[in-house]
Structures are given as C-alpha cells and as structure tokens.
C-alpha cells in the first residue's frame, strides 16, 4: 500500500469518528506508515484549518455524519485537490427527522442534518454505512456503498460480578445506557421494570437518562438515573462499570431498524447479558439463549425475560461469557475493503448518474460479521 494521508474532518461527532475510523481503522493505517490526522472544522477553527487543507493536495478525506455548510461549500469548490472522499454514516437521518416518538429537540437537529446530507453524498466516492438496512436505504442516493459493522474498541473485562446470584445484600444491576433517541423505547417497557422493582429486593436499575426518566420509573426503590455523559467520559465510565443485564428496547420503527448493533458491544464491555427487542438490527445476529435473549414488544415479555435470567444466574453468566467472547472477536485486524479499493485519485460521480438501478448492485460486502 503506497503511502497516503488520511484527514478526518470533524464536526464534533466523536462516537462515530472513534468507532468507525479513529480507534478502529486508523491504527491499522498507521501500522502501514500511513498518516492519519483529525481536523476539527467547527466554528472559529475552520479559519485555521482551511489554509492547511488547501495545501493537502492528493490527501484522502473522511467525513462523518455532518459538516458545517461552509465547509461543504469549500469542499465542493476545491474537490479536485483531494484524493478519495469517504463518508461514514451510522443513522438514518431522514427517518429520525420524521419519527414522532423522538424528542423534539433531537428531531430538529436530525432535520438539519438530513437537509445537509445530500451535499456530502455528492462529494463522496464511497459511503460506508453502519448497518445493512441503512446501506440498502441509501442505494438510491449513491452508487457505491459499503457496510462496516461497529468494532470493539474497548477491552472486555472479567465476569467476577457474576460470582453470586442476586440477593438483597448484593443486588444484580440492570442497565439501560441508550441515548435520548431511545427514551420512548425505554418508556414502553417501563411497566415491566416498575413491577420488578416493587416486587423484588434483589435488583437495582441504572438508567443513564438523568432527569428524563419515564414518570413510571421515578421514585422507585433502587433506581439510579445518572446524567448522560460526554463520549470520552462515558468510555471511562463504561470501562469501570459492571452490569448483569443490559436492556436494549427498540420499537419496530424505520429509525430503529437502521441502527447498528453497537449496544451488543457496549453490554459485553460492561460484562452483561443483553435482552433485545425482537426486530432489526438485533434479530439477525443475537443467538437466543446463547449470547442474549429476545423480548417481544409486550412489556410482560420483558418481565418474563428478566425474571428468567434472575432465576437462572448460571445460565445468565454463560450467556454473558458467550457475548464477551463474541465481542472480543470483533476487533478490526485487517483494513476494510473501502480503504484498500481504488487507491489514488478516485472517480467522481455526477449527481445525475446516481440512479437506483446502478446503486442496488453496488452495496459492498459487510466487512465484519457478527
């Protein structure tokens, strides 16, 4: 692989940047003597960055989710200066903007991001989506798509917290560490969690939602609601925190179906076994009873799964062990195909050529399989 420079233009979206490039792909590039640089292009920083970019003839660019409009405009004008442009995307922005279950402030932000996305798609030579469903939805908007599932970027710790079954003296921790985009999903299963906490004394809930806790769960015994943390602080928190059971409720919506399987890895890093909604993206990858359990949309089924794991601590530990081992296998060890293909100056695609007929046959192979 000839020496190249890779510049990630950051709009501050560190989770996407770290998971899909800086802490997964970039170390492999550097091992092959490739130079990787992150450039923050937000706000006043752009005035300092653009002269440097203007001197970076032939460098490859990586874009993640969004860019400030003036940066996109500059890239459109200066496109011929650069080599390949890769666009990384891990959410269906349009589906988020149209989902009435999502918080209004989040929907407004996604509406702005969705409105800007066509410019980034037009700039990109390759679009890398975080799930097959998301890639399929983008086929009519870009002719060259690849899929990269999230990779493990944090160590998986031991399972010493499973040494004993649940008891009032040492309750099992049940965790929900989803973003505010999943508050409606959490509220949907709240009746099951409320009943569990009222009727048992050997469980505690940790819901990382802060003041946005669903009303049904407020004031219950053994419920903590830490505020959501910035990405870097959450990484440190997650590395030192242990859960026995992780909750991933996801109502079957277009937005949720396009999500990645990142929560499987999050729960494995925290040493837990997950309970997942029986829908995409998890319905095609969780091995039920081996490395997780499925629950239907009925809160009663979530209660059934929780009670089963609590009543079978050895089986719960075995599933947590299987999930941890599977997660350890998801460390990226080879450069993905979208890095290796078409080295050098990439072909630009006129917007008018991005037709569905050409696109449907061009989704690349998934680089990692869970």
Image (cartoon, helix red, strand yellow):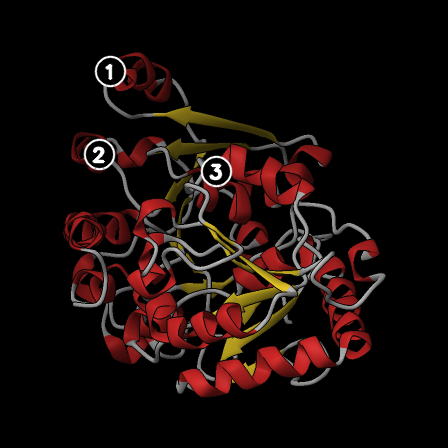
Mark 3 and mark 1: span between their CA atoms?
22 Å
From the viewer's perspective, is residue 344 above or below residue 245? above
At mark 2, the secondary structure is: loop
Q: Quadrant of the C terminus?
A: bottom right
Mark 3 and mark 2: span between their CA atoms?
21 Å
Name the residue rendered at 52%, 81% in the picture: 303
The mark found on residue 299 in the picture is none
Measured as percent of width and height from the top left, residue 335 is found at 65, 51
Name the residue rendered at 28%, 47% in the picture: 123
Q: Foreground: 274 or 191?
A: 191
Q: Foreground: 201 or 185?
A: 201
Circle 3 residue: 231
Q: Quadrant of the N terminus?
A: top right
Q: Foreground: 59 or 305?
A: 305
From the viewer's perspective, is residue 109 above or below residue 103? above
Compare marks 3 and 2 and give the one earlier in the sequence: 2
Name the residue rendered at 47%, 28% in the picture: 38
Circle 1 residue: 44
Circle 2 residue: 68
Q: Report if the CB atoms under discs 3 and 1 are less than 8 Å apart.
A: no
Residue 362, by quadrant, is bottom left
At mark 3, the secondary structure is: helix
**Which tag is nearer the camera, tag 3 or tag 2?**
3
**Which tag is nearer the camera, tag 3 or tag 1?**
3
Q: Foreground: 172 or 77?
A: 172
Compare marks 1 and 2 and give the one earlier in the sequence: 1
Count residues near mark 2 (Cα–Cα under 10 Å), then give few for <14, some for 14-19, many for 20+: some
Mark 1 and mark 2: span between their CA atoms?
11 Å
Q: Report if the CB atoms under discs 1 and 2 are less than 8 Å apart.
A: no
């Amino acid at each position: 692989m000839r020496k190249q420079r890779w510049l990630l233009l950051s709009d501050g979206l560190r989770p996407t940047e770290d998971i899909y490039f800086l802490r997964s792909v970039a170390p492999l590039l550097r091992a092959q003597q490739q130079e990787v640089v992150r450039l923050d292009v937000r706000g006043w920083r752009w005035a300092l960055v653009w002269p440097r970019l203007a001197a970076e003839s032939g460098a490859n660019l990586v874009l993640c989710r969004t860019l400030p409009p003036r940066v996109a405009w500059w890239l459109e004008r200066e496109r011929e200066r650069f080599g390949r442009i890769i666009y990384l995307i891990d959410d269906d922005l349009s589906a988020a903007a149209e989902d009435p279950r999502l918080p209004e402030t989040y929907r407004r932000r996604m509406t702005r991001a969705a409105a800007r996305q066509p410019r980034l798609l037009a700039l990109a030579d390759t679009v890398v989506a975080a799930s097959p469903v998301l890639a399929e939805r983008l086929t009519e908007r870009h002719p060259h798509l690849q899929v990269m599932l999230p990779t493990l970027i944090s160590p998986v710790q031991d399972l010493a917290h499973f040494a004993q079954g649940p008891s009032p003296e040492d309750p099992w921790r049940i965790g929900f560490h989803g973003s505010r985009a999943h508050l409606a999903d959490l509220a949907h299963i709240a009746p099951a969690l409320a009943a569990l906490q009222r009727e048992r004394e050997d469980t505690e809930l940790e819901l990382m939602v802060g003041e946005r806790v669903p009303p049904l769960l407020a004031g219950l015994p053994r419920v903590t609601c830490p505020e959501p943390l910035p990405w870097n602080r959450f990484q440190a928190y997650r590395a030192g925190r242990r859960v026995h059971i992780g909750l991933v409720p996801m109502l079957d919506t277009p937005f949720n179906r396009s999500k990645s399987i990142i929560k499987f890895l999050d729960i494995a890093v925290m040493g837990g076994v997950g309970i997942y909604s029986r829908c995409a993206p998890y319905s095609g990858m969780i091995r039920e009873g081996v490395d997780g359990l499925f629950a239907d949309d009925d809160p009663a089924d979530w209660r059934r799964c929780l009670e089963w794991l609590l009543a079978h601590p050895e089986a719960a530990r075995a599933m947590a062990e299987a999930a941890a081992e599977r997660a350890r296998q998801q460390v990226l060890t080879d450069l993905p195909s979208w890095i290796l293909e078409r080295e050098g100056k990439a072909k630009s695609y006129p917007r008018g050529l991005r037709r569905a007929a050409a696109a449907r046959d061009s989704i690349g192979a998934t680089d990692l399989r869970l």
